[in-house]
Image (spheres, rainbow, N blue to C red):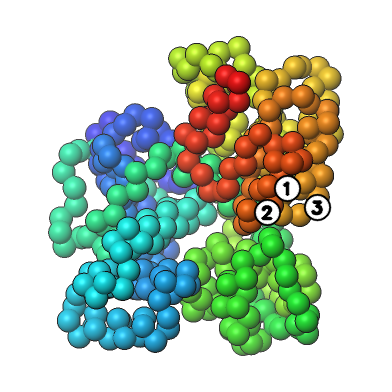
Amino acid sequence: MGKIQGDVSVLGISNLLQMLSMNRVRGLLTTQQEGQKKVIHFLDEGIRLVAGARRTNPLGEILMRTGKITRDQLDELLAEQRRTGTPLGEIVAQRSILGKDVIQTALREQVAEEIYDLFTWTEATFTFSEGPDGPSAADLGPLAQVVLDTSMMSIMIEAARRVDELARIQAVIPDVRLVPERLELPAALDDPSLDRNAIEDLLPLVDGQRSVGHIVEESLFPKFTVLRTLYGLAQRGVIKIRDRGEGEVGPVTVLRRPATPASERPEARGRTILVLSDLPTYRGALALCARNEGFDVLEGQSVEDAAQHLDRTPVDAIVLDAPIETDGGLEACMKVRGIAKVPIIVLAGNTSKQAIANALQSGARYVLVKPFKEDLLIERLANVLKA
């Protein structure tokens, strides 16, 4: 493959990453947009983020927002980091505050967030240089030692879901220069579809002065979580977004889904899967994942679509994207089960053990909590088709 370069708006981030992943190449991918740069190193054992961390202390923020350390502990650790120059993760490990597995999980989360963010870049240029040699030590960022061993398809599936959500969010927050304002806070905001910790972090920052962009920078949470939470609060009347100023954020990158040859997976041959989701890009990524394994795939966005497909074509299993933490999501699961006597695999997010139990009682064979590796989805499909 050698060296290739071009424009993301022409090729598409998803096409580029999929091409590199399918060809199993090794080398460095550099993307640049408006003074920002991300460098991804493709290795045999996975991928790593050589450069591109948005924040200077991502590990500390992740550990704090997940309740692993307190604000006072973080301030103390950062003070020692500045004094000694020792990486924050090493200080945490040396003090035996947390185990190495917890630290590595937090670091992998930050790497994944950086790569997901790449899918929202629309005006970027890229250069890929193939070869076994990695970057020089001087070019390595703080996350460069973390190898993300998940497949590119797993990343693309989760990125596709976020792209669809961002399209909805931009209808309410089209520009990060907009300023959110607090309205009267309800006595209780018990909404399982929103992250309670994110709400508690963000509401004090919504002061009628800070823009959405400033809130993103000051929050402990990743950009996508901040936008999703502000959108949810605006939809529920907790905050309002002022009229935009000049300019708008451009459209998000849409994943393209070229056809790929079927694999030799025996349980897939001659089997038809119906994928149901009202998020079109996410639905397409799930369908691509199944087609890559040799399944025939039908797509729909609603229970009504499922009924129409089933009138024409028998299916062997259904993959249903549904918010099972809500009555509507459980009702959708029951309706699909009522019209299709085949195994149903439900995909859900922000899900409690009780919500999973309710979904299983409503007809689901399995519940996968997003994000998940695509290998797990294919494994579950294989299991239900063998039964």
Q: How far apart are marks 2 and 1 (CA)?
A: 6 Å
Residue 338 versus residue 101 in the image, above or below = above
Q: Quadrant of residue 21?
A: top left
Element at label 2: helix
Total numbered badges shown on the rendered structure: 3
> Are dots 3 and 1 in contact, CB under 8 Å?
no
Classify residue 265 as left or right of residue 351.
left
* Residue 352 in sight here: yes
Residue at left offset 15%, top offset 59%: 137
Query: What residue did someone put label 3 on?
Result: 327
The amino acid type of the residue labelled 1 equals: Asn
Front residue of 82 and 3: 82
**The disc label shown at residue 315, or none:** none
* 377 lies above or below 83: above
Q: Mark 1 points at which residue?
A: 358
Q: Which residue is drawn at 69% across and 32% down?
A: 344
Q: Give neighbour class at mark 3: few <14, some 14-19, many 20+ (Cα, 10 Å).
A: few
Q: Are marks 2 and 1 in contact (CB under 8 Å)?
A: yes
Q: Which amino acid does label 2 sit on?
A: Gln
206 sits to left or right of 120: right
Provide residue 94's location: percent of width, then percent of height.
21, 72
Image quadrant in which the C terminus is located: top right
Instruction: Point out residue 159 in the picture as x, y percentages from the top left corner.
Output: 53, 48
Residue assigned mark 2: 354
